[in-house]
Every structure is written in C-alpha cells, then in structure tokens.
Amino acid sequence: MPLDSSAVQRSHSRSDAPLVLHVFPSFAVGGAQVRFAALANRFKARWRHAVISLNGDEACADRVGQDVPLAMLSPPLEDPRLTRRVWRIHRTLQELRPDVLVTSNWGSMEWAVANRLPPSLRHLHTEDGFGPEEAGTQLRRRVMTRHLALRGSTVVLPSQHLLRLAREEWRLPPASLRYVPNGVDLRRFRPDGPTTWLDLPGEGPIIGTVAALRPEKALDRLLYAAAILMNAGVAFRLVVVGDGPERQRLECLAVELDLSGRVRFTGAMPDPAPAYRAFDVFALSSATEQMPFSLLEAMASGLPVASTDVGDVRAMLAPENHPHVAAADDAALAAALRPLLEDATLRRGLGAANRRRAERDFDQEAMFQAYAALIDGTAA
C-alpha cells in the first residue's frame, strides 16, 4: 500500500479511533513485532494501526487478526543524504498526523530525529536490544544520538539492563523512562495441549530452541555445544525452530560437526506453542538479549532452560534454574545442558518451577494494560 493519508482511512474501523503509526526497522517475525501483533489482537478496533517496515519485510502482518484495523504503508523514498531523509520523514509525519508515533529500536531512530522538528507528535520509543555490533559495547555515536533524539519522548524498556543503560549511558530523564516487562500468553504456552510431531532421528531427550536465525543468536555456539555432548557420549536430539539469513551456514556447520543425524532445522512455525511441548530442554545460546520472548514461552511451557548469561535471563528464570545459566562459551553451555539431559527428575522439577515463575510474574495481560495506558496517554 502506498504511503499516503488515504491509505489509513481505508482501514475497516471507526474513523474517530486514534491512529497509531508504528515504525519498525523490519516487520519480520521477531520479539517486538510479535508483541505488537499480540497487543493489536488484544484490543482490536480500539486504535487504527499503520505500520511501516523500513526494509520491506512484512511477514509479521500475518499474525495480526482480520478484526484489527491495520494498514501496511511503504516508507518514504530513500536518499543518501541524511538531511533529505529526515526532511522526507518529517513531511510524512505531518501528512499522516497520527495521534501517536511508536518507533522501535535503533533502526527507526531517524524517525525519532525527524519528530524533534516542530510541530512534534506524541512519541513512544521501544528499545528491545541490540544487534551484534552493540552486543558488548555501546557505540558512542549511537549513545549520543539516543541522548538527543529521545529527549522529550517516552522510552519503553522491557529489561532492567536496558533501563540502567537508558539512565546511565544515554542519560535520558528518569521521568521519561518506563519499565514494562514482556509478558506471555499463559493459556497458549502451557505444558499440556497439542504437541508437534517433530519426526527426529536418533534417541534421547530433545533440546529445542526457537529463534530468528541471525548472527546475534549465536546458534553456532549451540551446535558446538551439541558436538561436545555427542563426543562425550550423551544421548540427545536437537531441534532448531526458526528461519533467517544464518540458516544455510548453520545447516552446513551441523554437517561438518557430524550432527546431521541428531539435528533438525524446521524453519519458522506460525504457532510454535506445540513445538515447545515436544521439547525436553530449552536452550538459548545468544550473544545478546534483553528479555527474550522465547525464554518466557519456554518457561510458560514448563521447560527447564540452559542459557547464556545475557540481559535479564538470570532474573527471569526460577532460582532453581540458575545453575544452568552459563558463560557465553561452547563448553560452558554444554556443561549447563548435560545434567538436564541426564536427569529426567531434574528436568521436571525445574520446568515446574519456571512455569510457576511465569504465572506469578509474566502474564501478558499486565503488559497489555501498561502499553494501552502509554498509547492512550493515561499512564502515570
């Protein structure tokens, strides 16, 4: 759909419903995009939504229900000159005049910059994490840009780690920061229910992971850890649910490590909930995370977890599961996985503890209500 104000008017909703413009670096299936889809599905026609995917990937639109007023818009024409890009974005914002502008992560920061030009719109910026270029250290230019572009905006952060960065490194006013932990659908992700038949070769407990196959997910680390376990004689099978630019390289690596008889790459699944119920152990191997939805889904599904110690992972898990949070190292991840693979009683106990933690702290309705108040402008 072309970018013009009439595109939004063609949405099937009340014309007086507030218009929310969401700008994503990509609208591929990922944590922030899935959260938006769940929020939109929860409140249906409460708002009209317009979504701009800056890279043109609109795959997550399939997760938005037909009863949600949604317009997918094309971004303004690219220009190599920054000032021209910012001016075009500003002109687009003034043409659309949404009630709220919502930007997502670093890739949409030029929209935050353009919105600093008067007359600015009410602006929410959601920051969910970083790519591999900022996995270890914040880039100084980006720190300064965030400091300048996000002053006067409300910045929504799902992790305590990000909240500290926003206060201490980006030096944003504390009053503008909102900590809203991610939540999970506890009815959909649960230990009982339909299970996906994964048709895996071999025998032994199933290690599963659900991830976009991107470099920062470090799935090669999980494959190397699996090779260590295989060479130690540990029985297991491994399932990787998800798709992305790393898939071919990872499939080749599995062959090189002689894991092809134990590993299956399923590709993306529209509904991964039944796949979680087929897993015995959930593994997260990422180099950088903040508050990963896949971890919440695994916890709600009653799974024990072996994970690298990134973002808020340790704080999210039940305390009983903490011994299986490891350094970002192949051997450390293998060591975290091994006891879970060899002890079914331990798996059941940790999985039950993680489910209880998800029920207590991460029900998605609290997240929905917090975001609704922010969009409506009624948050305290």
Image (cartoon, grey):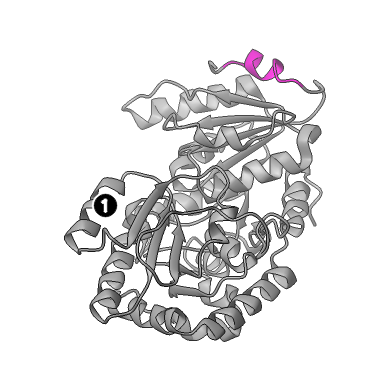
Query: Which residue matches tag 1?
Result: 251
Residue type at tag 1: Glu
The reply, left or right, for residue 108 in relation to residue 214 is right
Q: Left of 370 or right of it: where is 154? A: left
Vertical placement of residue 259 versus 149, above or below? below
Q: Which residue corresponds to the image point at 53% horizontal and 15% vertical from the top-left?
A: 2
Q: Position of residue 93 (x, y in %)?
A: 59, 26
Q: Which residue is located at x 48 percent, y 85 percent? A: 343
Residue at 50 percent across and 45 percent down: it is 269
* Residue 229 shows in this picture: yes
Pick the residue in front: 348 or 215. 348
Whole-percent x, y for residue 115 in the image: 57, 35
Q: Tell me which segment is drawn in magenta.
A: 4-12
Res 238 → quadrant:
bottom left
Instruction: Give 173 or 297, whichever is nearer the viewer.
Output: 297
Asked if residue 76 is positioned above or below residue 359 in the image, the reply reads above
**Residue lying farthest left?**
256
From the viewer's perspective, is residue 156 above or below residue 55? below
Question: From the image, which quarter does the N terminus lie in?
Answer: top right
Residue 42 point in image, percent of width and height: 75, 43
Q: Is residue 325 magenta?
A: no
Residue 303 at x, y = what percent? 57, 71
Foreground pick, 248 / 7: 248
Mark 1 residue crowding within 10 angstroms, few (<14) / some (14–19) / many (20+): some
Is residue 268 rendered to the left or right of residue 159? left
Question: Does 294 sit left or right of 262 as displayed?
Answer: right
Asked if residue 6 is among those painted magenta in the image, a careful observer would answer yes
Q: Quick one: 341 or 325, which is closer to the camera?
A: 341
Question: What residue is at 64 percent from the left and 35 percent from the top?
Answer: 64
Local SS, label 1: helix
Q: Is residue 292 visible?
A: no
Q: Quadrant of the C terminus?
A: bottom right
